Image: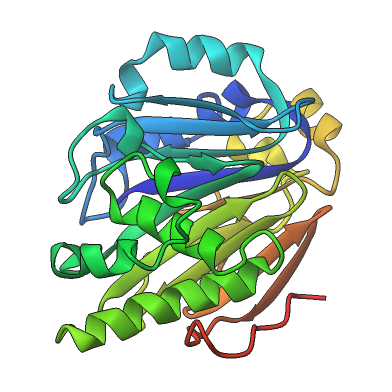
Amino acid sequence: MCRWQAYSGRPIRLEDLLFKAKHSLIDQSMSSRSAETPTNGDGFGLGWYGNREFPGLFRSIRPAWNDFNLRDLAAQIESPLFLAHVRATSLATVQETNCHPFRHGNWLFVHNGEVFEVEKIRRALVMEIAPELFPHLLGTTDSEVLFFLALTFGLEKDPLGALARMAGCVESIARAHGIPESLWMTLGVSDGKSLYAVRYASDGQAPTLYYSKAVEDLLVLGFAPENAARLGPEARMVVSEPIGKLTDAWVSVPQASALRLTDGQVELQPFRPVAPGARSVQPVS
């Protein structure tokens, strides 16, 4: 399994969370607390929003802990919203186009999990992607296919509804191929204004996902007081695995749940896959 982290709040230098925080994502890439994949060394990626109309993107097949370009970029870039990902591959090859985040327009997407036996249904899944989006499919991962299915099913207008239709499409195609439980995922998706996250698995055992109670108290993450104070109460994080020293600073996202984070406000709702042709799930109000 992979690991990912997202931040939303006042602009922060990326190194403060990626490198300086206790048990940061970079530390997790070397020594995750997960027994399944304690090392995530098959590449990494970073997507951030700044003053351009589209997000920046940097990806590499090097281990995150051993890339000096990442360290230099993180020390220079400030952003009010970013997503970072460290990868532990299953079937897809180690190549740059398979590293997360995936980007399309102003959207970024990260994934932890898998489509079980995707080799049996990949062709059927790819055929569901809208023809106008297909030329932008560059890698070979199940994760990128999930992203382009979500775009096909209306991500730009109805993010959580599109993700529900994407999940419904995957599960229905898998069942038709004799795969009763096919989908394990935590997803992070953003348009630069809001951050959406989903924790869902066909068998009810999705990977872990947490959001911070209040990142204004970043002293628990090992921050200097002046850095914690400047972020303010609207700063929040969503992570695969808690960072910092105090686990009670984090709230576990329940199984089969979706989250929307906007201006520091976290809203949770149940997440249920729906058939792509069914009525759209209403966006969070």
Residue 79 in view in this figure: yes
Q: Is residue 100 left or right of residue 89?
A: right
Give the image location of residue 271, x and y in percent: 55, 81
**Colour scheme in use:** rainbow
Q: Is residue 62 left or right of residue 156?
A: left
Q: Quadrant of residue 226?
A: top right
Between residue 257 and residue 55, name the one nearer to us: 55
Number of numbered tags placed on the structure image: 0
Residue pictured at 40% horizontal, 9% vertical = 68
Between residue 249 and residue 115, name the one nearer to us: 115
Give the image location of residue 252, x and y in percent: 54, 68
Q: Residue furthest front?
A: 131
Residue 62 higher or lower than 196, as above or below? above
Give the image location of residue 131, x and y in percent: 45, 57
Residue 247 higher or lower than 29, as above or below? below
Give the image location of residue 220, x and y in percent: 63, 42
In the rendered image, the quadrant that contains the C terminus is bottom right
Q: Quadrant of residue 158?
A: bottom right
Residue pictured at 29% horizontal, 80% vertical = 173
Residue pictured at 64% horizontal, 11% vertical = 76
Residue 202 in view in this figure: no
Residue 91 higher or lower than 272, as above or below? above
